[in-house]
Amino acid sequence: MKTSITNQNNVECRLIRSLEKILPLVDPIEEEKGGSILKNQTYNFQVALRSFAPKGAGTVFVRVSGALEKYITVRKEELVPATVIPHDADDYYVTKDVTLIPDALLPCDKGLYVPHGQWRAAWISVQLDGTVGGGVYSTAIEIVGLDGTVLAKLTHTLEVIDAVAPTTDLKLTNWMHYDGICRIHRVQPFTDAFYDVFKGYLQQYVSSGFNMLLTPLFTPPLDTDVGGERMTAQLVKVWKDESGYRFDFSALEDFIAFVLARGIEYIEFSHLFTQWGGKACPKIIVEIDGKEEKCFGWDTPSDSEEYKQFLDAFLPQLMRVIDKLGIRERCYFHLTDEPNATHEEYYTKCRALVKSHVGDIPVMDAIELYSYYEKGLVDLPVVFVKGYEEFAKRDMRNLFVYNCCYPAGEYYANRFINMPSQRTRVLGFQLYATGVKGYLHWGFNFYNSCRSRYAINPYAVTDAGGGFPCGDSFIVYPDEENGGAHGSVRLEAVKEGFQDYCALKRLETFIGRAEVCRLLSEWGLDGYAVYPRSAEKHVRFREKINALIKTYCGK
């Protein structure tokens, strides 16, 4: 197999593993030596290009051919700025310099520009659907200039293991932000034009492994300044007159039907109280005497009689809709995001009010304190990865984990743009070893500054206006030309991690969970911060898993 070439056309080409981020002025070293994949998973690798011609290679095209050609997608890696370096960053970063790093994955049909002396890369995805038989397949890769001249040729070899990975048993959510979709694509929430765009975001979401979706009953009260306001994203129509409140759930029902038909399995309703303590209400638009008004928000205490009356009217009717749709077992409620010890009194009041109506449907919230669970205040804790051990030492497994703008150090798994892809992908092994029920991240497409003070262009601003580490707030990029979303190098690493989890679940059917956990421990995994910090070791371990699956399938 040819993995690198330098020729008379002054073009240097290398096949590089998916886990190396190819910087413009740094020689890539993680050579792709071929690999293996289960027959319903996706295999990624990169073609790195550099030209020594005086004017560079200019625009080139990457063409593939072979038996797997129809399963292959070629995208170009777009450089984006990495500007905010966390003060507590450890030494497992690609770089801690302010620089450009490839992340956005864009269509390559119009070619890839290769300047003089700089590396550029194409991202190759082989997305199998379970129908290809087991065996070894070769793919020819040609680099072609604008005039049709073949500048370089390479060959990639992939073994397809004749085994199918199971569907994940995890609940995986990455919060969708509907105001960002509407603002960037210039559509109104939940109109036909909105759904034309949203389906592209949803496709990226589901194809990457996420199966649980934040659903906005009312505008989600997330990452907003106290007294601030985000674009209205409200699925429930509300009226108020002398007889009380009336509701129209038809838009909510349409939304739920739309997402369930496209691969979403679980619905998490947006928070019914404001973030960081639940002291106020989400923004709720109500029509009174034919005029829409903001009747609830930061100026309405969550324990006010007015909001209690509203929820007493709203929640029973919502429950009837849930039961009509037959989705009670798929639903989850949020109260307030990230409450701390000083918020317990408010949280207790909020929970009592909501649970009196929703019954056995679980309440899930991101919390740091075990006392919230111990006192029965949250049914499904979503625990910060750094605080996981506090829960795990009680032999508790009914929980999710999450990460966000921190931890940035101590080698915890995370997904910042300037982190190695292996640090993102290793989460899949960690989720398996710790036996949790799910994973949450807050930023699938948050295209605002920190606290939603203004909108940002994610191609130019990756740090939420300096508020978060680069890449924390979003992991897809808007496709403004065609609608929908483009993926990213980081999203592919997340997907690869979820695939690693499913491969372990397949191996578990042969050797049992205890033995799989022993293999992970032997490899060097322990919790969410201890693991071999090496792309090569990660790839070799995954190849070992595939080889074991192949062996047992052949018996």
Image (spheres, rainbow, N blue to C red):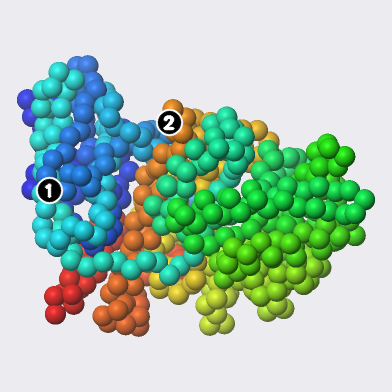
How far is the residue under mark 2 from the one under mark 1? 30 Å
Question: What is the number of the mark on residue 216?
Answer: none
Pointers 2 and 1 in contact (CB under 8 A)? no
Q: Is residue 417 left or right of residue 305?
A: left
Asked whether 406 or 230 is in front, the reply is 230
Q: Report the residue marked by disc 2.
A: 482
- The residue that disc 1 covers is 67
Residue 122, quarter of picture: top left
Q: Is residue 217 visible?
A: yes
x and y, in percent, of residue 437 in the image = 49, 71
Q: Would residue 266 be found to the left or right of residue 425 on screen?
A: right
Among the 4 quarters of the image, the one containing residue 51: top left
Relative horizontal placement of residue 540, taking residue 366 as reference (left or right) = left
The three-letter code of the residue at mark 2 reads: Asn
**Residue at 75% in and 65% down:** 316
Residue 388 placed where, x, y %?
54, 70
Residue 312 position (above or below residue 51): below
| Dot 1 amino acid type | Ala
Packing grade of label 2 (10 A; few <14, some 14-19, many >=20) is few
